[in-house]
C-alpha cells in the first residue's frame, strides 16, 4: 500500500470508530449495532481498511495490547463490595461451569450444522464462550437491573473474556500442532497471567500512589504503561495469557482502598478504551467478505437461535440452581449474553492461520463468529431493556432528577416534581433535613460525589438531570462542573451565584444557570418567605396560558416524562398537555 492509501485507511477507521459510537449514543442503541455494519460496508467499499493491508504484521500485536487494555478497564469496575456473600458461589458456577457447558454445547451445534474439522468446531465453541464488558456493561448501565443480578452479570461479562480467549488459544494450539488436547495448558496460561499480575499490581500501586500525589494528570498514561507492560510480558511467556493478567490487574486496582484513582480511570474508559473498542470492531468487521458471510449465513442464524433460546437459558438455570435469585432475575440473566470484541479479535487471528494450513472448515471461523456477534448484539441489545421492564427487574426506566439541597423550598420542588411523575432523589446534609425529605416521601441521603469512583458510579447511574440548590455558591459551582462530566452539560443546572459573595470567581461563559442570573439562593429565600409557592399548571393545546408578570416558569414535564428546565434567561420548552411548575407569588393563586 502507498502512504496515501495508509493515510486514508487510518483516517477512515478512526472516523468510523468514533462516528459510529456517536450515532449509537444518539439512537440509544448498543454501539456494536452500528460499528459492525459500518466496518463491514467499509470493507466492501475499499480494501484500504482491511487490517492485513493496513497494518500487516502489526495487526495481531496491536489486537493483543488493545484487548488487554479493554479487559483491564473492565476488571477495574469489579469491586468485591458489589457482590453479596450469598451470590459469590453463583458467580463461580456461572463463570466456570457456564464456560464449560457453553463451549461443549456450541461445539456440538457447530458440528451438526457445518461440515468442518472437529478441531474447528471446538475452536468456534471456545471463541463464542466469551461475552465481554464492551457489550454487557453498556447494556447494564442502560437497563439498570437490581444490584445483585447486575453484579452477577457484570462479573460474568468481564471474567469469561480472558477465560474464553485462553480456552481458544489452547484449542487453536492443539489443532495447529495436530497433537491433540493438552489438559494442563490452560492452567499454565492462567498461572502465567496471575504471576504477571502479581508482579504488575504492586508496581502499579506504588507508581499510582506517587503519581496521584504529585502529578494526577499522569495517572492515565502511567496506568497504560504498566498495563501494556504486564500484557506484553505475559504474552511473551505464554500466548494470550496477558488477557487474564490484565483482568486480575484491573480487579486489584478496583479493590485497593489506599488511593482513589476512580476519576482518572473514568477518563481512561471514556477516551482510550472507547476509541480502542471502536477501532477494533471496524478492523475486524472490515476483514469479513460478503461472500464469506453468505456461505455460512443460514446455519449461522440457526446457531444464534440455539445460543439465545437453548444454551444460555440452560447455563443460567444450572448456575443459579438453589441460589437466592428470584425467578424473574433468573429469566433476565438468561436473556443477556451478547458476544463482543474478544470473540471477533480471536476469530480474526486464528481462523485465517488455520485456513492457510489447510484445516477443513477453518475459513468459516471468522464469518460464523461475525454473524454470531452481530446476531446476539442485535437480539439482546434491542430486546434486553423491554424484557427487563416486563420482568420488573429494570431500573426506573424514566427520568430521575437529583436535587442537591434540603431546605424547605427545595423539598417543595422535589414533591412537586414527583407529582408530575418524575422520580426524584435528594442529596441532603443535615440530619433533620434528611428526615423532613423522607417524611415528604423523597429518597434522601448524603451525596457521594466525592467518594470512591465505584460508589459514585452506582449512585449516579440512574440520574438523568441534576439541580444544585444549596446556599453555598462555591459548592454549586464545583459540583456542577463535576456532575456535568457525568450527566452532560445540558442536564445539570444550578442557582445563580450572588454577584459578590462567592470566594471563587464563577465561569464567565457558564451555561445551565437555573431561570436566570437574578434567581440567587437569597432571592428565592426572600420570595418564599414572602409567600411565594410552586404551582403546577397544565399547558393547553392552543398554547401556554397567559401568565401574570410575577409568575416564573421553572420546569416543564411532558406526559411521557421528558424534562425541560428554564435556564440562562430562557423559559422551559412547553408543549401541549405539559405540566409546568411555576414560581408564583401569593396574589397569583
Image (spheres, rainbow, N blue to C red):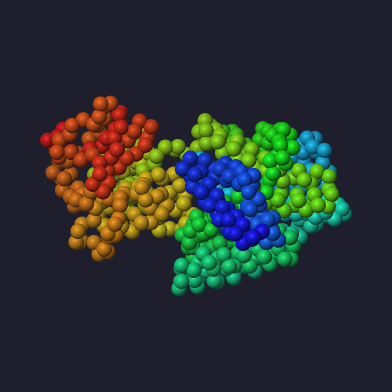
Residue plotted at (21% across, 49% down): 519
> In the rendering, at what x and y percent does residue 543 appear?
25, 29
> In the rendering, at what x and y percent does residue 207 appear?
54, 71
Q: Residue placed farthest to the top in the image?
A: 541
Is residue 128 visible in the rendered image? The answer is no
In this image, 96 relative to 437: left or right?
A: right
Residue plotted at (18% across, 44% down): 528
Q: How many marks?
A: 0
Q: Residue placed farthest to the left in the image?
A: 587
Viewer-closest of 566 and 254: 566
> Which quadrant of the figure has residue 275?
bottom right
In this image, 246 relative to 431: left or right?
A: right
> In the rendering, at what x and y percent does residue 536 appear?
25, 33
> In the rendering, at what x and y percent does residue 537 appear?
24, 32
Residue plotted at (29% across, 60% down): 507
468 is higher (above) or lower (below) than 334: below
Viewer-closest of 586 and 2: 2
237 is higher (above) or lower (below) than 50: below
Q: Residue placed farthest to the right in the image?
A: 179
Is residue 477 visible in the rendered image? The answer is yes
Residue plotted at (23% across, 31% down): 544
Amino acid at each position: 500500500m502507498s502512504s496515501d492509501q495508509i493515510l486514508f485507511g487510518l483516517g477512515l477507521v478512526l472516523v468510523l470508530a468514533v462516528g459510529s459510537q456517536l450515532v449509537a449514543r444518539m439512537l440509544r442503541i448498543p454501539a456494536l449495532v452500528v460499528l459492525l455494519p459500518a466496518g463491514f460496508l467499509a470493507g466492501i467499499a475499499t480494501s484500504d481498511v482491511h487490517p492485513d493491508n493496513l497494518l500487516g504484521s502489526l495487526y495481531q500485536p496491536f489486537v493483543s495490547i488493545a484487548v488487554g487494555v479493554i479487559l483491564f478497564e473492565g476488571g477495574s469496575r469489579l469491586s468485591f463490595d458489589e457482590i453479596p456473600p450469598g451470590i459469590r458461589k453463583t458467580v463461580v458456577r456461572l463463570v466456570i461451569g457456564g464456560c464449560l457447558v457453553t463451549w461443549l454445547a456450541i461445539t456440538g451445534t457447530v458440528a451438526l450444522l457445518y461440515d468442518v474439522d472437529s478441531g474447528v468446531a471446538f475452536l468456534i465453541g471456545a471463541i463464542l464462550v466469551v461475552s465481554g464488558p464492551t457489550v454487557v456493561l453498556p447494556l447494564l448501565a442502560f437497563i439498570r437491573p437490581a444490584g445483585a443480578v447486575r453484579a452477577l452479570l457484570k462479573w460474568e461479562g468481564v471474567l469469561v473474556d480472558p477465560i474464553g480467549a485462553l480456552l481458544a488459544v489452547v484449542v487453536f494450539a492443539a489443532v495447529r500442532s495436530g497433537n491433540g488436547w493438552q489438559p494442563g495448558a490452560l492452567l499454565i496460561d492462567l498461572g502465567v497471567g496471575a504471576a504477571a499480575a502479581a508482579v504488575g499490581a504492586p508496581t502499579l500501586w506504588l507508581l499510582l500512589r506517587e503519581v496521584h500525589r504529585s502529578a494526577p494528570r499522569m495517572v492515565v498514561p502511567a496506568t497504560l504503561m504498566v498495563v501494556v507492560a504486564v500484557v506484553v510480558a505475559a504474552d511473551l511467556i505464554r500466548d494470550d495469557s496477558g488477557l487474564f493478567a490484565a483482568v486480575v490487574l484491573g480487579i486489584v486496582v478496583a479493590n485497593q482502598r489506599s488511593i482513589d484513582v476512580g476519576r482518572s480511570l473514568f477518563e481512561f474508559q471514556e477516551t482510550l478504551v472507547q476509541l480502542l473498542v471502536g477501532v477494533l470492531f471496524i478492523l475486524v468487521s472490515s476483514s469479513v467478505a460478503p461472500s464469506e458471510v453468505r456461505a455460512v449465513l443460514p446455519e449461522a442464524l440457526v446457531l444464534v437461535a440455539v445460543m439465545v433460546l437453548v444454551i444460555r437459558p440452560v447455563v443460567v438455570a444450572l448456575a443459579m440452581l438453589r441460589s437466592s435469585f428470584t425467578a424473574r432475575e433468573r429469566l433476565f440473566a438468561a436473556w443477556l449474553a451478547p458476544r463482543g470484541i474478544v470473540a471477533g479479535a480471536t476469530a480474526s487471528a486464528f481462523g485465517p492461520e488455520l485456513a492457510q494450513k489447510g484445516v477443513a472448515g477453518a475459513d468459516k471461523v471468522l464469518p460464523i463468529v461475525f454473524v454470531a456477534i452481530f446476531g446476539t448484539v442485535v437480539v439482546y441489545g434491542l430486546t434486553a431493556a423491554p424484557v427487563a421492564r416486563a420482568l420488573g427487574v429494570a431500573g426506573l426506566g424514566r427520568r430521575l432528577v437529583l436535587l442537591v439541597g434540603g431546605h424547605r423550598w427545595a423539598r417543595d420542588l422535589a414533591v412537586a416534581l414527583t407529582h408530575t411523575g418524575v422520580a426524584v432523589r435528594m442529596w441532603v446534609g443535615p440530619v433533620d433535613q434528611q428526615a423532613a425529605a423522607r417524611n415528604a416521601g423523597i429518597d434522601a441521603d448524603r451525596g457521594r460525589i466525592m467518594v470512591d469512583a465505584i460508589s459514585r458510579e452506582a449512585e449516579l447511574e440512574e440520574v438523568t438531570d441534576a439541580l444544585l440548590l444549596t446556599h453555598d455558591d462555591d459548592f454549586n459551582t464545583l459540583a456542577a462542573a463535576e456532575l456535568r462530566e457525568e450527566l452532560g452539560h445540558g442536564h445539570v443546572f444550578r442557582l445563580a451565584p450572588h454577584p459578590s459573595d462567592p470566594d471563587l470567581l464563577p465561569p464567565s461563559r457558564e451555561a445551565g444557570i437555573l431561570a436566570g442570573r437574578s434567581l440567587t439562593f437569597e432571592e428565592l429565600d426572600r420570595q418564599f418567605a414572602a409567600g411565594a409557592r410552586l404551582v403546577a399548571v397544565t399547558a393547553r393545546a392552543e398554547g401556554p396560558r397567559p401568565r401574570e408578570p410575577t409568575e416564573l416558569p421553572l420546569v416543564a414535564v411532558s406526559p411521557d416524562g421528558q424534562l425541560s428546565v428554564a435556564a440562562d434567561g430562557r423559559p422551559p420548552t412547553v408543549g401541549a398537555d405539559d405540566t409546568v411548575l411555576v414560581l408564583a407569588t401569593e396574589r397569583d393563586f
